[in-house]
Image: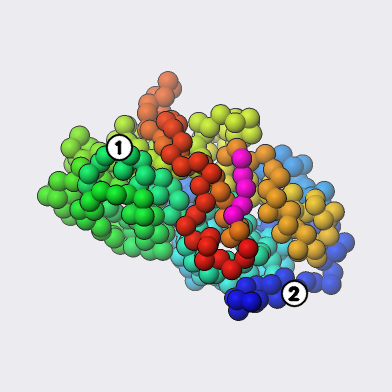
Amino acid sequence: MNGKLLAALSALCLMSSTSYGADTVKIGLITTLSGPGGVMGRNHRDGANLALEQLGGKIGNLKGEIIYADDEQKPDVGRQAAEQMVKQDKVDFVTGVIFSNVLLALYRPVIDSGAIMVGASGGPHEVAGEMCSPNFFSASWQNDQAPEAMGKYMTDQKIQSVFLMAPNFAAGRDMLAGFKRYYKGKIVAELYTNLNQPDYQAELSQIRFAKPKAVFVFYPGGLGIQFIKQYAQAGLQKDFPLYSVYTQNETTLPAIGAAANGNFETGFWSPDLKNPANVAFVKAFRAKYGYMPADYAASSYDAVNLIDSAVKAVNGDLSDKKGMIAAIKQAKIHSVRGDLKFNNNHFPIENFYLFKIVKAADGSYIRKEESVVLANHGDSYASKCPMK
C-alpha cells in the first residue's frame, strides 16, 4: 500500500475515547477574513452560518459550533490556526481555506490529526493526486477544472492565440496548467506576477505589444478588481477580449462594475443556476446578508450540509470516522450546484459553465449562464490518487 495512504488511514484510528456521546460537533473554519482576500472569506463565513442556521443550529441532531480563524492569507498563520483547532479546540471537522498555498501548509496537520476536512475553495493538484487522503474532501473544485473548461471553450471558438497571466503561487500555476491542457491554439506569453501586486501597467503594455487574439487570466478577490479596472482603463477590451476564472464574480463585480461588461468566465456555480436548491439558497442568503453570494459561499454552504449528512449517518457517533467518510462520499445533500458526486480522490465531478458578464435590470453586473462547457467533469489528477 502507498506509504502516504497508509499514514492517512492510520490517522483515522487516532480517535478519542470520549468522542462517542459528545453533545457538540465542532467545525473549524479557517479562511481569509482580512486584506484583499477578506471579501472571499466573508462568503465562506456567511455561507457556513446560513447552513447551520437552516439546520436549526444542529449538526446531525447534535449541537453545532463553528470556530473561526483568519489565516491572513499567510501559510504559516493558517498552519498555526489548524494546529490550534485540532490540538486545543479538538474540532471534529475542518473547512474553509481560500488560498491553495495556505491549504498546502495546513493540510498535513489536519489530516494527521484524524479530523475530517471538507475544503470549501482551494484545490491544489497535489492534494487531488498523490497526497489524497480518505479524510479530505473538496466541496468546491480542483484548481485546474474551471480553466480547463475555458481552454476548451476558447479552442471551440477558434481563438488562435492567447496571452496568459496569473499570480505566482500554487493556484496561479494550477490555473494556467489547466487552461493549457485543453487549449489548442498558440500561447503568445505566460506571465506570473507577484502575489498581491497592485499595478499591472507594465504587463498591459506587453499585451498591447504582443497582439494576441485574446487574454486569459486568474486574479481572485482584490487582485481581480485592480486588474480588470486597469485593463478597461487601458482600452484593451475591444482589441483583446478578456476571459477569466475566479476573477469576475460576485465578490468583485460590485467594485468592478461596467469595466467587466461583456467579459467571460467559466466556473462550477453562479447565482444564475436554476436548480431548486440554488434558487432557495440565493434567496435566503440575500435576505439574511444583503448581498449576492459568490462561489465561496456556495461551496461553504454545501460543506456544512455534507458534514451534517455525515454525523446523521452515524447517529452522532463522532468516533465512527469511517462511517462519516462513507456518508460524505455518497453526497446525499441537495447541493446548490445541482448534482454532486465525488471522484475516487474525493474531489467533485461536476458541470463547468460559461458565464457572460452582463448588466442586470437593477443596474448591477452579474454572471449570466451561457452554456455547459464540460459536463460531469472530473479532474486530471484522480488517476494519481492511490485511493480507488
Q: Residue at x 69, y 43 (%)?
A: 333
Count of marks placed on residues: 2
Q: Residue at x 41, y 45 (%)?
A: 149
- Residue 307 horizontal/vertical position (percent): 70, 52
The 10 Å Cα crowd at callout 1, few under 14, some 14 to 19, many 20 or more, is: few
Q: Which mark is residue 14?
A: 2
Instruction: Considering the whole magenta stretch, tell me its main secondary structure.
Output: loop
In what quadrant of the picture does the N terminus appear? bottom right
Judge left or right: residue 47 versus residue 370.
right
Residue position marked by numbered label 1 in the rendering:
157
Disc 1 is placed on an element classified as loop
Task: Tell me which colouring the rendered structure shows.
Answer: rainbow
Name above or below for residue 205 compared with residue 240. Answer: below
- Report the residue that reaches farthest toward the bottom: 3
* The stretch drawn in magenta includes residue 342: yes
**Residue 274 figure quarter:** top right
Q: Amino acid at mark 2?
A: Leu
* The stretch drawn in magenta includes residue 30: no
Of marks 1 and 2, which one's residue comes earlier in the chain? 2
Q: Residue at x 61, y 40 (%)?
A: 339
The 10 Å Cα crowd at callout 2, few under 14, some 14 to 19, many 20 or more, is: some
**Residue 138 figure quarter:** bottom right
Question: Does residue 81 show up?
Answer: no
Q: Which mark is residue 194?
A: none
Could you say which is closer to the camera, residue 331 or residue 72?
Answer: 331
- Residue 73 horizontal/vertical position (percent): 46, 61
Name above or below for residue 358 compared with residue 250. Answer: above
- Residue 106 horizontal/vertical position (percent): 55, 69
- Report the residue that reaches farthest toward the right: 21
* Highlighted magenta segment, given as a residue range: 339-343
Question: Does residue 151 show up?
Answer: yes
Judge left or right: residue 294 versus residue 304.
left
